[in-house]
Amino acid sequence: MAMRNKPLNRFLEKIDSIAVIGLGYTGLPLALRLAERFSVIGYDSDLVRIQQLQSGFDSNQELVFPQLPNLIPLFTNDAVQLSNACVYIIAVPTPVDSNHLPDLRSLKGAIEQVGEFLKSGDCVIVESTVYPGCTEEFCAPILEKISGLKMGEDFSMGYSPERINPGDAVHHIGAVIKLVAASDPATLYFMTQLYQHVTAAGVHACESIRVAEAAKLTENIQRDVNIALLNELSAVYEKLGINPGAVWEAAATKWNFLPFRPGLAGGHCISVDPYYLLDLLKQQSINAPLVEEARRINEGMVARVAAQVLKHLKTVKNEENDQRVLIMGASFKPNVKDVRNSKSVELAKLLMKNNIVVELVDPLVDTQLLQQVSGLSLTRQPHGCYQVVIVAVNHAVYKELGESYFCNCTFGTALVIDLTGAFKGVIHNRKYWTI
């Protein structure tokens, strides 16, 4: 098979090179980790990103670059450099479009570029999240068409789903188990050896590429379903006049209660991955009602919070007639600056459609990036008084705030909506609502 004549020693001796295509949250840490032992080409089509990396700066502020130049990949946006590699690892975004359908344009573009330089004996590994069958049924035919080679005869393919958790210093790339799967046993053996140099936690070899692809989706679908359950129960208990936060606190005293919290389930995984499976199932006339319902419930949380805001604003008036709303946190999760798929942004836009003046603050997010992604801008500092303050993201710096912060920036009739539960038992002199 294709990898049989490519022993790992050739890579350890830096005779052969590995190319990582896509240098975002997934590709960059992988490229840096691999560069500790191998010759690595880090490719990204974004020239600005490459220039930043070449200067040793990560705009995501996730990584610190090694001091030794020989431990840093060759960062480039020159696709011709890919011709010097014989293993290609693709780590580009695979989002969904506005209709929640898989958007494979970046993956297709990366595959097409690799196809132009693919040689006999090479291996292509996909790390991007995809639906079961995508690697072999979508990616492989493109490679074959462009290169004129045949998978299984001339080149091989593998799949190793990323498990990067931005903002998490504990579960970094070197501390989580890597799944690997391949088109043939020789390539699987090679990948197992290769990724053992990436993570100290170990490598799990899957029986097929489709299993690995499905496992990646399942990891996040499970989380989506559990969060949806808590979101639904939160609404149910509220209607029953029961404090949801007190219920979670009491239930958590049982040893096998899973510590999920209700909230805005956004980001690149929970709010994306289920749609990749659902789209595949729709094509094959297979139903997954629980997965569909979980997505429906979680997608509806933005509207639920907005309804709470509008309900409050209708009940209060003040001399200044100031109905402004402050949203604390614009990123998709705590302690990161990434705003893509942020439900805070979605909430802000929905309120604005209802003619509400909304201001966004976030200590980590870059306002230019927010403007590019969403068209919204950040407020540097809260000013004046607000009728509603929404704590949407539980950034670590917010944990230092006390009730006086909220009292100083709100009217006496204001409502504090705490979607994180961080200020339960802290807010006494303002109306308080949590989920």
Image (cartoon, rainbow, N blue to C red):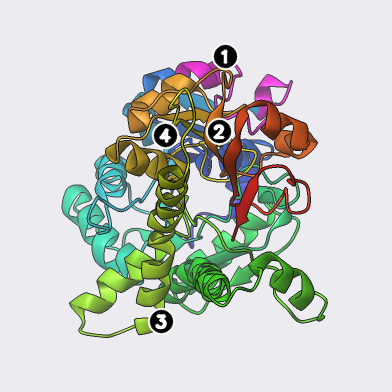
Residue count near mark 3 (Cα–Cα under 10 Å), binned few <14, some 14–19, many ≥20: few
Residue 92 visible to the viewer: no
Q: Disc 1 designates what residue?
A: 55
Residue count near mark 2 (Cα–Cα under 10 Å), binned few <14, some 14–19, many ≥20: many
Mark drawn on residue 394: none
Q: Nearer the viewer, residue 151 or 129?
A: 129
Extreme-front residue of the structure: 319
Q: Nearer the viewer, mark 4 or mark 3?
A: 3
Would you identify the image quadrant in which residue 296 lies? bottom left
Mark drawn on residue 337: 2
Picture residue at 56% right of the left edge, 78% below the top: 240
Q: Nearer the viewer, residue 173 or 236?
A: 236
The three-letter amino acid code for the residue at tag 4 is Asn
Magenta run includes residue 316: no
The three-letter amino acid code for the residue at tag 3 is Leu
Residue 238 visible to the viewer: yes
Q: Disc 3 designates what residue?
A: 290
